[in-house]
Amino acid sequence: MRSTSLFYRRLASPLHAARASVGVAWVLSITTAAVLLYHPLVLVPVFAAVLVAGAGAGVGRTLLRALRFAAIVWVPIVLVNVVVSRDGLTVFARLGDLGPFGQGNLTVEAVVYGAVIALKVMLVVLVTTLASLAVDPDETLRLVRRVSFRSALTASLATRLIPVLAADAQRLAEAQRTRPGGARGGTRGRVALVRAVVAGSLDRAADVAATLEVRGFASASRPPRRRPPLSRHDLAFAVSAVAVLALAILARVSGAARFDAYPEIHAAFGLGTFAIAAALFAAIVLPFADRRGIEP
Amino acid sequence: MSAPLLSFRGVGYRYPGASAPALQDVDLDIHPGEFCLLAGLSGHGKSTLLRAACGLVPHFHGGTFAGAVTLAGLDTREHGPAHLGEFAGVLFQDPETQLVTSTVRAELALGLESRGHGAAAVARGVEEVALALGIDGLLDRSTHELSGGEQQRVALGAALAGRPPLVLLDEPTSQLDPVAGDELVGLLRRLNQEWEIAVVISEHRLERVLSAADRVIALERGRVACDGDPAAFLGWATDAAPPLQTPAARLFALAGVEGAPVGVRQARAALRSAGLLGEFGSRHEQPRAARHAGKRSRPRLARRSTRGAALRMRGVWHELRDGPAVLRGVDLLVEPGETLALMGRNGAGKSTLLRHAAGLLAPTRGRIETGGRVALLLQNPGDYFVHERVIEEAPLDALERVGLAWAAERNPRDLSGGERQRLALAIVTAGDPPPVLALDEPTRGMDRAAKAELAAELRARAHAGAAVIVATHDPEFAAACADRAVLLADGRVIADGSAAELLAGGWYFATETARILGGEAGALLPEQGADLLAGRRPGTHDAVITGART
């Protein structure tokens, strides 16, 4: 089954089948790699691996949708970096004296560094989106509940209310379209609609609060610790998380993925670089190869 | 008799800022294993009584509280809803706001975890309640992808996970289609009979629950107006509160037959013993109605309308991208002045068809022609209200048309359910009268009096020349307002005929009167059934019966 919803749904995939703590650890390890690494030759395979992982988790199409939104930040990041950066040496355009901002020299290095930073941001967005789609939020929040029950439950409720309020907003907008003459456009119309959604959300919140009251929220205590046996997918993603983290640290420490944008671009292009890139790709993708016992 | 599980003593309650009390001098006891039905018109205190029973009143809502409510020996003034929740599970109307986690398993576990049960007890509790309610197949599903009926069953499971001895339900079937509603009532009956769980349920469609109930408590302006077994309640309703009568009781009252029946089976037995129904009922007549229902589908489409078409659909398909076809080649012709009931189970395509008629959706294949604007009233009237005053929502002449001119300066959200529905109607029909008026499930959560008002309003609009199309699950309402019915299944029109033919020949899509009389002579409403029975009274000429049967 394939999902295009932006919210978690239990699907038949190895990542869905892994326990939330392992899923979160796996996502955090990729995020850490994205933060530690700068070499495009390494980042691009990691990026591709996350897309393959999304497809393996049955949420590839939704990830691509999220990517379209994330791509919006790519251009501003590059532009801003090009305009504000003064560290590059290879000038490709001179804007002259910009007063308090100094000489407006645009450099190739600033463009490349901006692109790398944008790639890292998009990678983090992609990985966190994958986590929200494929790691059970209830289980995740349950982990937090053992530390702070009410904070976690409040977060859980907020998560739950988002799709409910989105559906409310869609219904309200549709109802406005059925008015004679259609929905009132312009700022006033939108403000009225937003106000109605907010008013509705307060009613919703009051109903949910009443439900929580009768379910014993006021006397809530720490949830019990569960110790389910480790599944093959728990083990696979745990090993993958450790491997990704280790490879990222190794790449950083050994210099195999060294990348300096300023003052001139210098990047490692040895066998080690390619080996690290291939190993990262494999480490991220391989847990999805075993599809035994994944039925939701 | 055992000690009461729930007890009200001199209870009075007024919501903060309210001018009138919601409950007054309520005295009653609910015993273990009782199945109690709460009856009453909207706004007469049913929900408040249920909220007082579980401690939400006064702890959650505030207000002024008098008297005492004890649940399992605990005074609700001293114990909050969290503590009382161990003894009473609660189910409200809207399933969406009762599910607070993302998966069914987590939802069932939440209450147990909140009360500090150990991991093994939580796992067992979840498993037990899932099996008991038949939702074990849903355990790993996301809550937001469940149907309304599934959501309501999961919410009931969450309320029962701690095995409380009492369950309180506030119109739990109002958001469900008849199939899901009946399933829920059947489930409650099983819980009550097999585990002796006491049930207190408020419901507008009393006929749905009455046969399962041991006792009916009717509220009027916050006071207990009647407290007795179902037969006693129906006797009281016949004299004192006709809007609370079931169709069967009204049929008997109008026909002058003694003893208001609690359900269809009892009604048929009573009529049979009175010689007003054949030995096998009149079921041999029923197939005739069923056979004829639907036969007009093609002729109606083939012929040219003599009055012009208010709405004409030709081979309309609606195919979802990466999904199923919701409408499959629908042909439909609706003429001016016609009132059409669009029926079918959830997902049959009723709402989608109306959205196409109103131009909110475009068909992926086929053509739609209309004789002008199609005014569409969607399911939830509250979705239309985006202003603080009624007069800002609709012009005064439209408000006058629906009898709401007096409320012009009020906040739309302060109106009652029926008034909100009328205001939404005023909004979508403002300006020139639309030639087509379409309504999607307009009677959800409405009491019988409000439904009767709406049916009269729709008939008046049809009389004035509008084509009226109502998508509804409620056969009683369809019979009261429609002269034609169309049955949809899987996006196809499977039957199209007069309401008298179509609503007399089925199990689900039949009125209670039709089910009692076996669909004879197309009698759908108690008034029509009473006329039919009057012709069978001893001394009445045989020709009347013969005529009625043909």
Image: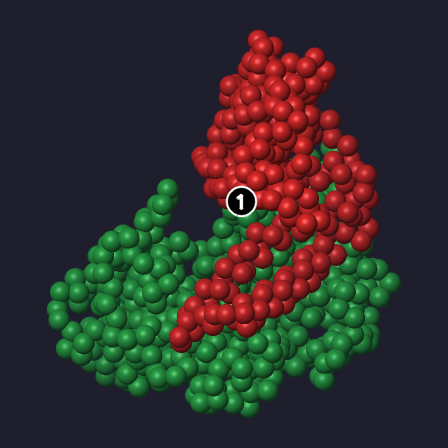
Which shade is chain A?
Answer: red
Residue at the location (76% across, 76% down)?
Answer: B16
Residue B402, horizontal then vertical, whole percent: 46, 85
Is residue A234 toward the left or the right of residue B209 in the image?
Answer: right
Q: Residue furthest right?
A: B78
Is residue B417 toward the left or the right of residue B253 in the image?
Answer: right
Q: Work out which quarter of the rendered image holds the N terminus of chain B and state it.
A: bottom right
Is residue B359 toward the left or the right of residue A25 in the image?
Answer: left
Can residue B485 be seen from the camera position used here? yes
Which shade is chain B?
Answer: green
Q: Work out which quarter of the rendered image holds the C terminus of chain B and state it.
A: bottom left
In the displayed structure, A161 sits above or below B469; it is: above
In the displayed structure, B483 sits above or below A59; it is: below
Give the residue type at disc 1: Ile
Residue B275, horizontal then vertical, whole percent: 34, 73
Which of these two is toward me, B178 or B2? Answer: B178
Q: Quadrant of residue B142?
A: top right
Residue at the location (38% across, 80% down)?
Answer: B458
| Residue matched to label 1 | A72
Q: Residue furthest left?
A: B303
Q: Residue furthest front?
A: A97
Tell me the chain of label 1.
Answer: A
Which of these two is toward me, A160 or B96? Answer: A160
Residue at the location (62% across, 42% down)?
Answer: A104
